[in-house]
Image: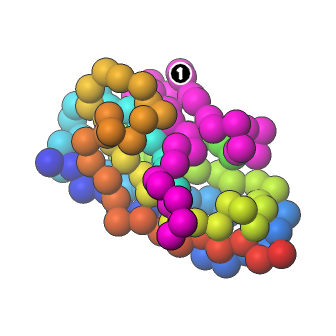
Amino acid sequence: QVQLVESGGGLVQAGGSLRLSCAASGRTGSRYAMGWFRQTPEKERDFVAAISWSGGRTDYADSVKDRFTISRDNAKNTVYLQMNSLKPEDTAVYYCAAKFTYGDSSWRGHYDYWGQGTQVTVSS
């Protein structure tokens, strides 16, 4: 079992920045990729970014590329999502997730554990 706890969400004006954190506990001795997804009441849970265990590979949704940066600190069992140049359409609940198996990192069905989510609201 892995427990994931997100933090860092909040209210920010358009053009501003936020940094989300996701702390993992439990089965952290194994290698696992991490991802961030987001969801609004009107949409499914969409892929935002993912990072491999080593951090050597990252993937981003086109909508956040060049604005968001995913990183991880394995010594702290923590993954981060730095969000810059935020837009109102970035408003959503953001979830982090852990993936222990092979598979497309952009597909939510490949993830094994999820956090409870943190709200990000971007005002215009």
Q: Amino acid at mark 1?
A: Gly
Q: Residue furthest left?
A: 1
Q: In this view, which residue lies farthest toward the front? A: 42
Kindly identify the residue that appears in the image at 14 percent across and 48 percent down.
1
Residue drawn 62% across the image and 59% down it: 19
Residue 116 lies left or right of residue 67; in this view the side is left
- Quadrant in the picture for residue 9: bottom right
Label 1 neighbourhood size at 10 Å, few (<14), some (14-19), many (20+)?
A: few
In this orientation, which residue lies closer to the viewer: 35 or 73? 35
In this rendering, the answer to whether 78 lies above or below 95 is: above
- Residue 24 picture location, percent across and down: 31, 51
Front residue of 43/76: it is 43
The answer to whether 109 is drawn above or below residue 52 in the figure is: below
Where residue 44 appears, as percent x and y from the top left, is: 47, 55
**Residue 116 lies in what quarter of the image?**
bottom left
Task: Report the residue marked by disc 1.
Answer: 56
The residue under the point 35% across, 23% down is 103
Q: Position of residue 6 (x, y in %)?
A: 43, 62
Is 57 included in the stretch rendered in magenta? yes
Classify residue 123 by image quadrant: bottom right
For the record, the magenta segment spans 39-67
Task: Please say whether residue 16 is one of the residues in the magenta stretch.
Answer: no
Asked if 43 appears above or below 10 in the picture, the reply is above
Rendered-image quadrant of the C terminus? bottom right
The residue shown at (65%, 74%) is 121
